[in-house]
Image: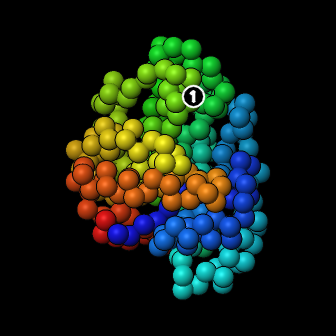
Amino acid sequence: MFLADYHTHSLCSPDGYAPLTDMAQAAWEQGLDELCLTDHCDLLTADGHLDFSFRWAPIEEQFAQARPRFEGRLTLRMGLELGEGWEAPDFAQKLSSHPRLDFVIASAHNLSRAEGGGKDFYFFDYRSDEDCYAVLDQYFRCMEDMVKLSFYDCLGHVIYPLRYMNERDGNHAALDRYEDQLRRIFAIVIDKGKSVELNTCRGRTVEDWRWVLGLYRDCGGRLLTLSTDAHRPQDVGKGLREAAELARELGFTHVAAYEGHEPILKEL
């Protein structure tokens, strides 16, 4: 079984805890074939202000140190998790054109400035399912705008807000009411030749993906990446084997690895 973690963070993310060398060592110890580092570049701050402060130099330095240590043992890919790309499409496209970049995840961690004030999902107080759906209505509108752009290779963690709405705040929000909108989103992703990720959230949410991935598959989706969203070495690879089993159960036969933004199909 080919196993690669395609969504991880290092000290170059504001919420990261370890250098790439430590994350790579954990991946090698877990028996992974590839590790893709996708440090954060969010174009909105937590309170909704534009942020263009991202710099490549610290990430490039980490790869210069780590790649010689793991040559022949573990393939390291340079990625980026680019959040809120709809807020500055030209800047997002420029970032994704880095000559040594392999992979870009398009994520939405905030609502749009125009509609939701740019607020980060983490900081909402979800007191009821109705509160959740009011935010999710805006979330999927932002996502639909985002996937129409071309700066990304993969649509990131579609079920992301549920980790705060349900897991943290104890609600029971479900995504089936957004089926029509998700079908439109997936149709755009598929037409552009992009992928969708199954993000285990450090092994906690594998089964939560069943309905969404089944819908993606029903829409004709074939390109899939597996990832953990690990921010610490001990979380690298968590839930990947279970995610691969779920993907196979839903009819996926391959996962995608990336080199220079080109998907490489690997048999599950």
Q: Quadrant of the N terminus?
A: bottom left
Q: Nearer the viewer, residue 184 or 15?
A: 15
Residue 38, image x, y percentages: 59, 58
The residue positioned 35% from the left and 63% from the top of the image is 255
Identify whether 240 is placed above or below 141: below
Residue 168, image x, y percentages: 57, 28
Quadrant housing residue 101: bottom right
The residue positioned 35% from the left and 57% from the top of the image is 244
Q: Nearer the viewer, residue 63 or 142?
A: 63
Identify whether 86 is placed above or below 95: above
Q: Badge 1, how many Cα within 10 Å: few under 14, some, many 20+?
A: few
Residue 63, image x, y percentages: 68, 73
Q: Amino acid at mark 1?
A: Arg
Inspect this view and state whether residue 224 appears: no
Residue 268, image x, y percentages: 31, 65
Q: How is the image coloured?
A: rainbow
Relative to residue 126, is residue 250 drawn left or right?
left
Inspect this view and state whether residue 47 appears: yes
Identify whether 205 is placed above or below 134: below
The residue positioned 57% from the left and 19% from the top of the image is 126
Relative to residue 212, is residue 95 drawn left or right?
right
Q: Nearer the viewer, residue 42 or 245?
A: 245
Q: Which residue is mark 1?
A: 168
Assign a secondary structure to mark 1: helix
Question: What count of labels does the image hold?
Answer: 1
Relative to residue 81, is residue 145 drawn left or right?
left
The residue positioned 24% from the left and 51% from the top of the image is 249
